[in-house]
Image (cartoon, rainbow, N blue to C red):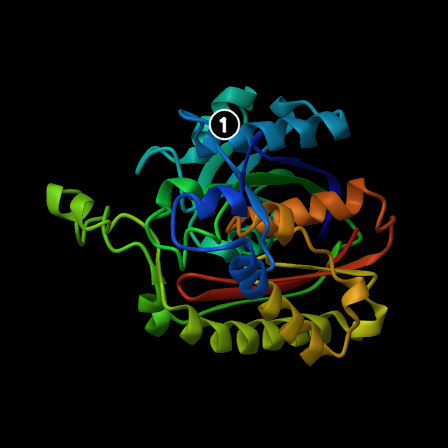
């Protein structure tokens, strides 16, 4: 038993926040941002627009493209760290809006690695017989955890959502995968307040502790090493060489990180899909949106191999070789 990719979908909010806009908000410049990150603009959710709203749109599109009724879904997995509420799960809200009455729903929290973690979980549910048809959604409203007074982080983040529809199949679309984590590095990328450790208070709000905090220089080296190892392991498990990959869809966190990982794999950047210039870092949604775009834009065709890799808070990292 394996899984088959039936369809994909993605959704980006209408509002564009450009580097020129950020120049008016903090002490920064378009040159500084693009040189260090590769980002020129990012999408921002409208007031009142939450993770379930973005997730619903990408999920609806994936179902529509496959002409697949929501009532046939057995499970909905939502990868997010910016859910609508502490509880209930954002997945339950998406389930209700889709009318997927026969599906169980849950969220997973693996930050930027959430989509590939979710893909592994969905495959496990299908292979174990717990579910036949799974909708995997990655939806993030990172602008709500962005400190727009911190020029080192506010230039990085954007909002968006991607979704994939998966079903049981004799031929497995996942040829090889790898997921990992190391909690000893948790302090390098986190939101200090808002949970049971530091509940919301006037002090936590005034000190901006509900926003993302990051030690960028320390993360760079760890991210390159972790994603390089994850990608090589996924390729080994798939029994494939880098040159057999049609396209690479990396996490869109930083252009220099992507270039370093790709160089370590000995692959040309011509095979790498980039949308970081337009969207920035959308956390779990980055790889999901990238996968949808390489497929819908005709950059890959049925039977082609796609390598995806990612790295995020936790720290977490993952890689997957997928046959589309």
Expressed as whole percent of the image width and height from the top left, the position of residue 191 reads 30, 54
Nearer to the camera, 125 or 187: 187
The answer to whether residue 167 is left or right of residue 36 is right
Q: Is residue 60 visible?
A: yes
Residue 15 vertical position relative to residue 278 in the rendered view, above or below:
above
Q: Quadrant of residue 28?
A: bottom left
Expressed as whole percent of the image width and height from the top left, the position of residue 239 reads 78, 74
Which residue is drawn at the image coordinates 40% and 72% (left, top)?
A: 182
Q: Is residue 199 visible?
A: no
Residue 26 vertical position relative to residue 216 in the rendered view, above or below:
above
Q: How many marks?
A: 1
Expressed as whole percent of the image width and height from the top left, the position of residue 77 reads 52, 41
Which residue is drawn at the image coordinates 48% and 76% (left, top)?
A: 222
Say which element carries label 1. helix
Which residue is drawn at the image coordinates 13% and 42% (left, top)?
A: 201
The answer to whether residue 92 is left or right of residue 247 is left
Residue 185 vertical position relative to residue 94 in the rendered view, above or below:
below
Which residue is label 1 attached to? Answer: 53
Expressed as whole percent of the image width and height from the top left, the position of residue 284 reads 52, 50
Which residue is drawn at the image coordinates 60% and 59% (left, top)?
A: 38
């Amino acid at each position: 038993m394996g899984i088959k990719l039936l369809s994909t979908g993605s959704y980006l909010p209408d509002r564009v926040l450009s580097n020129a806009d950020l120049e008016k908000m903090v002490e920064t410049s378009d040159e500084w941002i693009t040189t260090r990150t590769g980002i020129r603009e990012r999408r921002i959710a409208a007031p009142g627009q939450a993770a379930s709203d973005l997730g619903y749109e990408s999920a609806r599109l994936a179902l529509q493209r496959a002409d697949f009724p929501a009532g046939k879904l057995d499970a909905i997995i939502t990868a997010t760290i910016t859910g609508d509420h502490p509880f209930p799960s954002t997945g339950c809200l998406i389930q209700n809006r889709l009318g997927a009455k026969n599906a169980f729903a849950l969220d997973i929290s693996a930050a930027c690695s959430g989509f590939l973690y979710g893909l592994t979980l969905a495959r496990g549910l299908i292979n174990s017989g717990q579910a036949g048809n799974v909708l995997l959604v990655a939806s993030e409203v990172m602008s709500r955890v962005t400190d727009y007074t911190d020029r080192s982080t506010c230039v990085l983040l954007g909002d968006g959502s991607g979704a994939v529809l998966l079903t049981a199949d004799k031929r497995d679309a996942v040829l090889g995968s790898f997921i990992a984590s190391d909690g000893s590095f948790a302090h390098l990328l986190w939101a200090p307040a808002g949970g049971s450790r530091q509940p919301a208070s006037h002090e936590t709000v005034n000190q901006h502790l509900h926003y993302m905090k990051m030690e960028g220089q320390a993360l760079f080296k760890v991210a390159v090493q972790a994603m390089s190892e994850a990608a090589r392991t996924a390729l080994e498990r798939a029994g494939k060489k880098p040159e057999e990959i049609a396209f690479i869809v990396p996490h869109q966190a930083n252009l220099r990180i992507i270039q370093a990982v790709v160089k370590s794999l000995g692959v040309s950047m011509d095979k790498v899909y980039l949308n970081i210039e337009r969207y920035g870092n959308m956390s779990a949604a980055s790889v999901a949106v990238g996968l949808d775009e390489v497929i819908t834009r005709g950059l890959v065709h049925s039977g082609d191999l796609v390598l995806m890799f990612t790295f995020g808070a936790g720290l977490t990292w993952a890689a997957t070789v997928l046959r589309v």
